[in-house]
Image (tube, coloured by chain):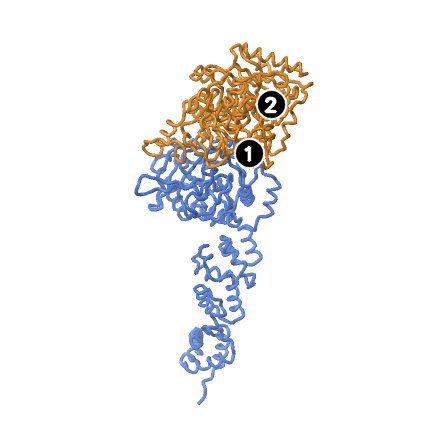
Chain colours: A blue, B orange
């Protein structure tokens, strides 16, 4: 039987506020354990939470970017469970009334754009971290992360393949990064993903029994875990078995998922409205203020690149998938107004240098203005495109700008017609056999002559000029008499 | 002149202002009183003489510098569920027997800013769960009028300290009657302000939506002075209400002629104790003579008050008390096998039976499948009770009713019968459910010579009206001036 996977994703995104969700402690990453804590986030007796307005503003921004309805009244609820990294032994979260509901975002799939529903976006606080001593049966608690604001973004079960899941994650992450409310770092845990997966006979509507997948801390792992889990469920069903509702952990070392706890063992979180926090009224004026600050979002930018700059859709998608890359592109185009040339250069040369990663881009030594300068030198014929690649590689290594590299290494393109004519005449003289064969119809030999000219000029000859002169000279060729 | 420790805050303030005594002398007088009677009363978990004398010296500096405020130099007892930085705050529980908070509660900060003198941390029912101060891990507080009797609870220590002159005023907290009931049992004046009037930051939570800090004092004047100190918005407490509060002393000595007091028949219909019935009648007569009219009215949902309270309060408590797990502070079991076992043993050893009972009640009520039937239903009852009061206040200025159904009962009498103990709060709980201000003041004595109080309830943020009524009542009676023969 043919099966269709049904996937919904729950994303936790750490908000980039300066201070924590319910106290004034710093959210800075990497401090000494428990340095960024106070009685409130340590869960001391008697303390009370006070909501960080910035966290609410960021949540509203995300809700607007995801086309959500923002609830004028929402509530914080306590999610009760015991764990040493949770000092109050409850997490302040939202349950019945989240900040926002009923939204959507679009993703690119092989079959074109597809809309994925967003069920809800709610605010909550992060837990701390346990550090285990491998030599003793002792664990330590670090509460620096405790109380850092998170938003949870829950999708509708609209996703139909691991590829779509990855596309959804990338889109969502791009939106968060464009909004500058989350750094989107999956490896460091500031952007986390859990998945609900089930399969059903293709063409049917009823949902199958789902499992929940956890511990997928990279885009690649999400895809692998989903694929494994889909295959596993189909195999179970094909073998006449039943899917058990449970939580499963992905093990990156084996690529497999394994049962963590069954439905019967599931926690009863005993949610109830947090009496320490008043019902949250989201002022419509705040919503409008946030709407006014929304930047151009990835999809809008992509459409504009296609429409106004004539960039092919695929390239526009790549250029806008990362906020940093899109800003790099736009800045370069501002200084070198040939969008296609800039796009081509970024898509090939720059991507090769940075290995397609944001981290590579931020550590890349070539600034947009330096790249623009190089591309302008190609445009005005100072260097050839080929030479420019060599120059670019050196720019990436040394951080020097193009003119100084070109000058140091004497790479200025030879566009002097007379100088090139002299070289070309010499080469034709020295290769009479090839010339005859060319004249007999072996026109492919033109490339040979171009190569010889380039060799003689150490690559600096202006290629189009070389072509032009060569063809003219060959057409009019008369061996030098005497 | 009577001994300094016997005087009220307003009297002492005058003496201090006139330099007839120093704050250190006043403090020494109270500390000596504690020394002489504390063994019999057991009002305190921790007496803090060093802190007190240091604060008194600071107060004298303020007085000398002309920076004195109305309560500068006045000795105060603080219930042991309010954090005083650097001093044990145990909540009457073994699980916090060694807990020293690293911060001050907002009310403690206000006490310090005013230059008051903290003489000790007062005994209380464990986590304020109880009506008799018998559930304290440190043992019961004795009623200064009869040591065989309970002082009431849960703020029994704070109230007994004021009644026995071991403090001039005290801070208590009131979740279902914990200030008013002991105040009635020990013959002093106590008020639970409107929910949101006084910051809860630094008050160790029992039931967050009901807890409220309030003052306990000898008379209405001191209550007004304390309300001036305590009421006010606190940005650290999201449930604290940002609004302007009046100077409560302006309500003193003001005629109450023409005021109307409502008598809920659901309350008076339940009264069986003849001492309480008599005191209510006598108090009514005094007030009538002062020009007050009484109207009979109905608060139809009051009967569900206790039932709903014992869903909401334990539900919140089950979550609030989850943090006492032996991981971060407080008691930790000595021997355990793994994390879960540490949790279990720590909590089994650290909490007393009443606290355990309420944690279990609350955990059950919040469980999946029961939430709607219990917590949600109780929340609806709470709304109905609030609306009952709102309707009642369209017909009267305040409500007049008993504080407790009986005078103080004997130590040990109800401790093994939780339902009987819970019923003690039948007249006080609805006030917390509706978030209203409620005051208990001395109304007379039982045939046995035990104090009997009565209760006045006002609309939200009308504490001034309660001060006005109490002030006039006390101007024409002397029950509040009686002292136990210690």
Compared to residue A394, the image places residue A202 above or below, namely above
Q: Quadrant of residue B277?
A: top right
Give the chain letter at badge 1. B
Compared to residue A242, the image places residue B277 above or below, namely above
Can residue B377 be seen by looking at this rendering? Answer: no
Which tag is nearer the camera, tag 1 or tag 2? Answer: 1
Q: Position of residue A49 (x, y in %)?
A: 51, 36
Q: Position of residue A47 (x, y in %)?
A: 49, 35
Q: Which mark is first along the chain, 2 or 1? A: 1
Quadrant that contains the N terminus of chain A: top left
Q: Which residue is mark 1?
A: B60
Is disc 2 surrounded by few (<14), some (14 to 19) or many (20+) residues within 10 Å? many
Q: Position of residue B47 (x, y in %)?
A: 46, 28
Residue situated furthest bottom in the rendering = A482
Quadrant that contains the C terminus of chain A: bottom left
Compared to residue A438, the image places residue A48 above or below, namely above
Q: Which residue is mark 2?
A: B220
Towards the viewer: B473 or B293? B473
Separation of residues labelled 1 and 2 (CA atoms): 26 Å
Give the chain letter at badge 2. B
Towards the viewer: B390 or B465? B465
């Amino acid at each position: 039987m043919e099966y269709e996977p049904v996937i919904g994703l729950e994303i936790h995104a750490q908000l980039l506020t300066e201070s924590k969700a319910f106290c004034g402690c710093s959210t800075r990453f990497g401090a000494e354990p428990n340095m960024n804590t106070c009685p409130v986030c340590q869960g001391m007796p008697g303390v009370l939470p006070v909501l960080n307005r910035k966290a609410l503003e960021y949540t509203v921004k995300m809700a607007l970017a995801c086309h959500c309805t923002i609830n004028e009244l929402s509530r914080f609820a306590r999610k009760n469970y015991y764990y040493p990294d949770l000092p109050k032994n409850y997490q302040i979260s939202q349950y019945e009334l989240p900040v926002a509901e009923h939204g959507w975002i679009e993703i690119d799939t092989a079959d074109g754009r597809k809309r994925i529903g967003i069920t809800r976006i709610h605010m909550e606080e992060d837990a701390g971290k346990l550090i285990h001593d491998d030599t003793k049966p002792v664990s330590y608690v670090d509460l620096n992360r405790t109380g850092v604001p998170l938003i949870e973004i829950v999708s509708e079960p609209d996703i139909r393949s691991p590829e779509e899941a990855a596309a959804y994650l990338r889109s969502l992450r791009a939106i968060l990064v464009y909004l500058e409310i989350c750094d989107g770092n999956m490896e460091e845990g500031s952007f986390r993903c859990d998945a609900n997966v089930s399969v059903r006979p293709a063409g049917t509507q009823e949902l199958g029994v789902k499992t929940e997948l956890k511990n997928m801390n990279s885009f690649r792992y999400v895809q692998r875990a989903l694929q494994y889990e889909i295959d596993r469920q189909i195999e179970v069903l094909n073998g006449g078995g039943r899917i058990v509702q449970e939580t499963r952990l992905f093990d990156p070392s084996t690529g497999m998922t394994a049962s963590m706890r069954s439905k019967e063992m599931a926690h009863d979180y005993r949610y109830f409205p947090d009496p320490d926090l008043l019902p949250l009224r989201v002022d419509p004026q705040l919503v409008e203020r946030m709407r006014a600050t929304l930047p151009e979002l990835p999809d809008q930018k992509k459409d504009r690149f296609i429409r106004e700059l004539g960039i092919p859709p695929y390239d526009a998608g790549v250029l806008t998938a990362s906020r940093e890359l899109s800003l790099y592109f736009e800045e370069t185009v501002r200084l070198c107004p040939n969008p296609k040339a800039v796009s081509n250069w970024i898509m090939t040369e720059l991507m090769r240098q940075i290995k397609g990663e944001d981290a590579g881009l931020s550590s890349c030594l070539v600034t947009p203005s330096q790249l623009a300068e190089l591309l302008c030198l190609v445009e005005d014929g100072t260097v050839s495109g080929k030479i420019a690649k060599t120059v670019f590689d050196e720019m990436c290594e040394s951080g020097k700008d193009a003119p100084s590299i070109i000058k140091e290494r004497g790479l200025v393109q030879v566009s002097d017609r007379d100088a090139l004519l002299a070289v070309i005449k010499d080469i034709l003289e020295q290769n009479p056999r090839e010339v005859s064969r060319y004249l007999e119809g072996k026109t492919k030999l033109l490339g040979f002559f171009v190569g010889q000219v380039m060799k003689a000029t150490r690559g600096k000859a202006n290629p189009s000029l070389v072509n032009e002169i060569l063809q003219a000279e060959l057409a009019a060729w008369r061996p030098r008499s005497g | 002149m009577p001994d300094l420790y016997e005087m009220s805050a307003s009297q002492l303030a005058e003496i201090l202002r006139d330099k007839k005594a120093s704050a250190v002398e006043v403090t020494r007088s109270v500390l000596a009183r504690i020394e002489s009677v504390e063994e019999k009363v057991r009002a305190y978990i921790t007496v803090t003489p060093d802190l007190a004398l240091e604060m008194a010296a600071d107060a004298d500096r303020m007085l000398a510098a002309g920076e004195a405020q109305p309560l500068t130099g006045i000795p105060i007892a603080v219930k042991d569920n309010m954090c005083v930085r650097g001093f044990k705050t145990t909540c009457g529980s073994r699980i916090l027997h060694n807990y020293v908070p690293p911060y001050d509660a907002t009310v403690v900060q206000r006490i310090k800013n005013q230059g008051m003198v903290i003489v000790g941390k007062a005994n209380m029912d464990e986590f304020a769960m109880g009506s008799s101060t018998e559930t304290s891990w440190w043992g019961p507080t004795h009623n200064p009028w009869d040591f065989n009797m309970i002082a009431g609870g849960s703020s029994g220590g704070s109230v007994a300290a004021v009644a026995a002159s071991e403090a001039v005023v005290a801070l208590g907290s009131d979740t279902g009657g914990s200030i008013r009931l002991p105040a009635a049992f020990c013959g002093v004046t106590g008020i639970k302000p409107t929910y949101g009037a006084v910051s809860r930051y630094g008050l160790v939570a029992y039931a967050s939506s009901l807890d409220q800090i309030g003052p306990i004092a000898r008379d209405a004047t001191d209550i007004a002075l304390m309300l001036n100190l305590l009421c006010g918005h606190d940005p650290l407490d999201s449930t604290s209400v940002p609004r302007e509060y009046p100077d409560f002393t302006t309500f003193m000595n003001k005629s109450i002629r023409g005021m109307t007091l409502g008598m809920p028949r659901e309350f008076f219909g339940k009264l069986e104790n003849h001492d309480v019935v008599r005191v209510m009648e006598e108090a009514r007569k005094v007030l009538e003579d002062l020009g007050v009219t009484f109207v009979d009215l109905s608060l139809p949902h009051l009967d569900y008050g206790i039932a709903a309270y014992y869903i909401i309060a334990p539900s919140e408590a089950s979550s609030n008390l989850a943090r006492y797990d032996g991981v971060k502070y407080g008691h930790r079991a000595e021997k355990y096998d793994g994390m879960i076992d540490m949790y279990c043993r720590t909590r089994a050893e650290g909490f007393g039976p009443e606290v355990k009972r309420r944690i279990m009640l609350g955990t059950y009520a919040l469980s999946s499948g029961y939430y709607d039937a219990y917590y949600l239903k109780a929340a609806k009852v709470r709304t109905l009770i609030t609306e009952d009061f709102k309707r009642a206040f369209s017909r009267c200025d305040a409500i007049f009713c008993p504080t407790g159904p009986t005078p103080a009962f004997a130590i040990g009498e109800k401790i093994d019968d939780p339902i009987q103990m819970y019923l003690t709060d039948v007249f006080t709980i609805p006030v917390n459910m509706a978030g209203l201000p409620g005051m208990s003041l001395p109304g007379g004595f039982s045939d046995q010579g035990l104090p009997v109080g009565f209760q006045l309830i006002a609309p939200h943020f009308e504490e001034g009206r309660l001060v006005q009524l109490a002030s006039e009542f006390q101007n024409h009676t002397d029950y509040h001036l009686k002292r136990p023969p210690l």
